Amino acid sequence: LWPAGDAGDVAASAVAPDVAAVASLVRQALGVEAVRVRATVACRALCPKVHTDNVLARCLVPVLGAGTVVCAESFEFLGGADDAADEDGVQPRAGAEALILKGRKWPSGGACPHRSPRSLFAGAEDDEFVASAHHHRVFLSVDRLEDVAS
């Protein structure tokens, strides 16, 4: 995520408390002892199709670039939203929003359909997909350890 050497060490040290805080909040919200935090650097839409995850719940935290796009009907559970959905029934989220999405293992069902943004940049039009070596989307995925341990 950061360059090697002193600059990378400083950057990693600066975000470590925030990552630890997110992990703690997810542990509390899900009532679990341990979570896995995975950082992903994407230069394209990794999950371009609407899907649900085979986990109890997953927290997605954008660090750089556009946030995850979720289906509009999911907002009844998430607390409502004012933005209009697009023709696919998905709703772009602001870049800085962390989301905890129910997965297929949620006891009462109702997994939250979502997909990667088609644009890497928060605020860009969804069909403006731009990628180069200098433009990345960085996000954290936080999962219960039971869902990802093999």
Image (tube, rainbow, N blue to C red):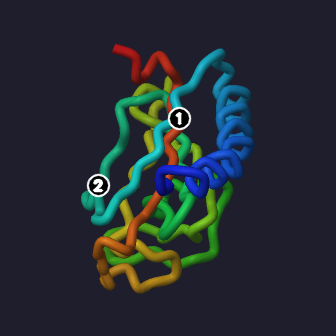
Residue drawn at (60%, 52%) of the image: 6
Can the viewer see residue 77 in this picture? Answer: no
Residue contact between numbered discs 1 and 2, judged by CB atoms under 8 Å: no
Q: Answer yes or no: is residue 83 visible.
A: yes
**Amino acid of disc 1:** Val
The local secondary structure at tag 2 comes to loop
As drawn, 106 above or below 118:
above
For residue 95, side relative to residue 10 (left or right): left
Residue 29, numbered circle:
none
Mark earlier in primary sequence (1, 2): 1
Position above or below: 63 against 21:
below
Q: In the rendered image, which residue does mark 1 sit on?
A: 37
Rendered location of residue 12, percent (x, y): 61, 48
Secondary structure state at the residue bearing disc 1: strand
- Classify residue 98 as left or right of residue 52: right
Residue 47: mark = 2
> Image quadrant of residue 97?
bottom right
Gap between marks 1 and 2 measured at Cα: 18 Å
Residue type highlighted by circle 2 = Cys
Indicate whether 38 appears above or below 87: above
Q: Position of residue 32 (x, y in %)?
A: 64, 18
Residue 53 image point, x, y percent: 37, 38
